[in-house]
Amino acid sequence: MNDFDQIEPGLWLRHGTTPLALREYRLAAFDMDSTLISIECIDEIADAVGRKAEVAAITAAAMRGEITDFKDSLRRRLALLAGVPAEALQRVHDERLRINPGVAEFVAACRGAGVRTLLVSGGFTFFSERVKARLGMDFARANELEIVDGRLTGRLLPQCWGEIVDGAEKRRTMLETASLLGAPPSQCIAVGDGANDLPMMGAAGLSIAFHAKPAVRAQATVAVDDGGLDRALTLFAR
């Protein structure tokens, strides 16, 4: 962490950075899986058919940046989900999905400061819409699974294939939402943990790596390595 100053144990700020007051930002964009929530949803769905290890290995490689084509990695993982009963999605949500520590507090602080919030995920709308509602977020964008006769087909809905939410689409969605709010990129905060978050994090005025992969941590403005996301709030009060 040679390019960072340690503010507190496990909380780092890039040299020469002075975050604006939170109220001076207009939009905060968040990854979902392993950022807002504790799991990678696709891995937990795969567990329903005994393929979690195989899917999780692809997920981990993609998040580390070892697989650079996120769309291809998603297609490969989706194919392994063919035949999973749709009710498995609800079980994953109810039994395994947990909001990460400090996330609710961070989102609430954004709301209190007038900062709009965007969930933008390479995961699935079944989960993103529920997480958005639970946290009281303003906007959400994710991929939509195709379900036929009560089972996953291993594909997205046909209209989604041309607009898979990958790193480039996350960046585009954040900037488009900011533009609709009349905000420049410098007034955006982007929070993520994996390689496909880097494009939006690189475009934002402030980027927060939350328990992130080393390549993401190295390029962020702020790194939260220990504790909850709410620890980053101390930087806005400095």
Image (cartoon, rainbow, N blue to C red):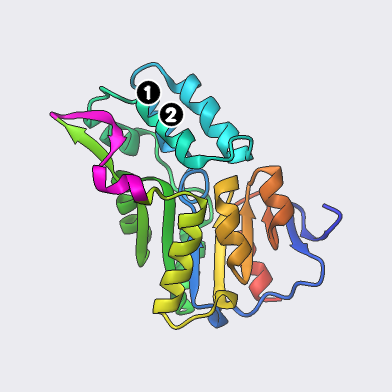
Q: Could you tell me how far apart the alpha carbons at marks 1 and 2 are, in whole angstroms?
A: 7 Å
For mark 2, does the 10 Å Cα neighbourhood hold few (<14), some (14 to 19), or many (20 or more) residues? some
- Is 94 contained in the magenta span? no
In percent of width and height, residue 220 lies at 68, 58
Which residue is denoted by mark 1 in the rendering?
A: 80
- Outermost residue toward the top in this view: 50
Closer to the camera in the image, 33 or 122: 122
- Measuring from the top left, give residue 227's x and y in whole percent: 63, 50
What is the x, y in percent for residue 110? 48, 71
**Residue 83 against residue 90 in the figure, above or below:** above
Marks 1/2 in contact by CB < 8 Å: the verdict is yes
Q: Is residue 222 visible?
A: yes
The span shown in magenta is: 149-162
Q: Secondary structure at mark 2?
A: helix
Which residue does the image show at 26% across and 36% down from the upper left? 90
Q: Nearer the viewer, residue 67 or 47?
A: 67
Quadrant into which the C terminus falls? bottom right
Asked whether residue 157 is drawn in magenta, I would say: yes
Disc 1 residue type (three-letter): Leu
Q: Nearer the viewer, residue 23 or 234?
A: 23
Q: Could you tell me how many numbered marks the image carries?
A: 2
Image side of residue 203 versus residue 158, left or right: right
Instruction: Decide if residue 125 is on the left or right side of residue 210.
Output: left
- The residue under label 2 is 76
Q: In this view of the protein, can residue 225 be seen by the observer? A: no
Q: Residues within 10 Å of mark 1 (few under 14, many from 20)?
A: many
Mark nearer the viewer, 1 or 2: 2
- Picture residue at 53% right of the left edge, 29% below the top: 58
Tag 2: amino acid: Arg
Residues 40 and 202: in front is 202
Considering only vertical position in the picture, is 21 above or below 71?
A: below
